[in-house]
Image: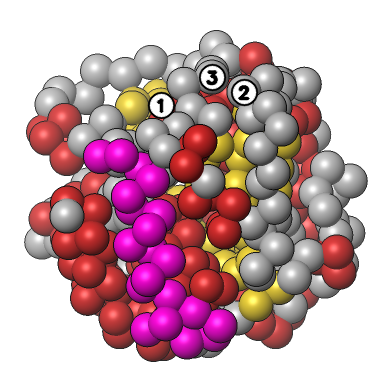
Amino acid sequence: MKKRKIIPVLCAAAVAASLAGCSGSSGSAAEKGADTQAPKAEAGAEAGKDEAAGAKKDEGGSGSANEKLIIYSPLTESMIDSMLAMFEEDTGIDTECLAMGTGDALKRIQTEADNPQADILWSGTIGTVKNKSEYFADYVTSNEDAFYDEYKNTEGNLTRFDTIPSVIMVNTDLIGDIKIEGYEDLLNPELKGKIAFADPAASSSSFEHLVNMLYAMGGGTPDNGWDYVKQFCAQLDGKLLGGSSAVYKGVADGEYTVGLTFEQGSAQYVGAGAPVKTVYMSEGVIFRGDGVYIIKNCPNESNAQKFVDWLTSKDVQEFMNNTQYRRTIRKDVEAGDAMVPMDQIKVIQDDETDTAAHKSEWLDEFKELFIE
């Protein structure tokens, strides 16, 4: 069995550190619960099977560029580990993953643009990545024909691999009789200082919550949502977390009563039997396409394309949907039982182009309100 590196990168400063990592997932109960044995999947390209990979090893030697893929990802270590094990088995391609927040990953990709050190950014919502799309290469997978129309790669370099709703995660041991049905309930004075929220400049899931707040609490008009955001910032009581994982881990571990996260972050703990529940905001929930992106001029472009094809194939989408709590973007894969059906959720839309255009402005406005 190949050794697979997953290297946690906690902040931008840590990126410069030497690449000394470890393989395997973290030891939390929820993450272990998500480590379901992966079935062998159809990878899409027959040349990627083990026999072909073995031939490449004979030609290029172990560790050659032909059999390697380097990934930056903000996903949970359990998902990274289980799915990359599956990818390696299916294709024979060795992988190395540096785990970091989406914001840190984008900064690193921009810094390395003249000499890319990775091949793939795996995860990061379209709204977060679109403003940096010049750093990603065009590629449209043949699997696009099976995608829902709203999740097709019309841009040429922004492939969706799942769709993510923003949710509120609640620790049921701590919440008591406090009602949590939506954003408005987070303004309860009893929750001040007990709400986990990450810096939206560093966490794509927190930025998506900011967008969701502006549209849901602004009645569809973002400018009308800032009064709510100001009140919400006061409820944080000066606490802003450094990344997405700190939110769902903080709620599950009992450090916070509630947290604003993404569906998988909460659902993985619900599935593992932790004392938490997932709330879909009554004011409305935005479902955002999450992407897999090939870095422009990356060292292993062919393998990066194979990864995109593999990740969006039917077998892998079924596995991811049913065991990793990630909603599929394929029309031929049914939603998993662990997730609330979309017809039971109040779904709202934002203007993605407008959101991308105002991202910097909205982040600056949030920062000002937070430090008031």
Residue 370 forms part of the magenta stretch: no
Residue 104 % position (x, y): 24, 47
Residue 219 forms part of the magenta stretch: yes
User: Residue 41 falls in which quadrant of the image?
Assistant: top right
Q: Is residue 88 left or right of residue 13?
A: right
Q: Which mark is residue 97?
A: none
Indicate which label's residue lies in the foreground, 3 or 1: 3
Residue drawn at x 34%, y 26% as measured from the top left: 7
**Magenta: main secondary structure:** helix
User: Counting other residues with Cα less than 10 Å from the Cα at mark 2, is it few (<14), some (14-19), or many (20 or more)?
Assistant: some
Q: Which mark is residue 6?
A: 1
Residue 257 shows in the view: yes
Q: Residue type at mark 3?
A: Gly
Q: Nearer the viewer, residue 301 or 23?
A: 23
Disc 2 target residue: 174
Secondary structure beneath disc 2? loop
Q: Is residue 320 left or right of residue 83?
A: right
Residue span colored magenta:
218-238
Residue 166 shows in the view: no
Which label's residue is closer to the chain start, 3 or 2? 2
Residue 138 % position (x, y): 40, 77
Q: Residue type at mark 1?
A: Ile
Q: Nearer the viewer, residue 306 or 346?
A: 346
Secondary structure beneath disc 3? loop
**CA gap, disc 3 and disc 2:** 7 Å
Position of 351 relative to 170 (above/below): below
Disc 3 target residue: 254
Q: Residue type at mark 2?
A: Leu
What quarter of the picture does the N terminus occupy?
A: top right
Contact, CB < 8 Å: mark 3 with mark 2? yes
**CA gap, disc 2 and disc 1:** 33 Å
Secondary structure beneath disc 1? strand
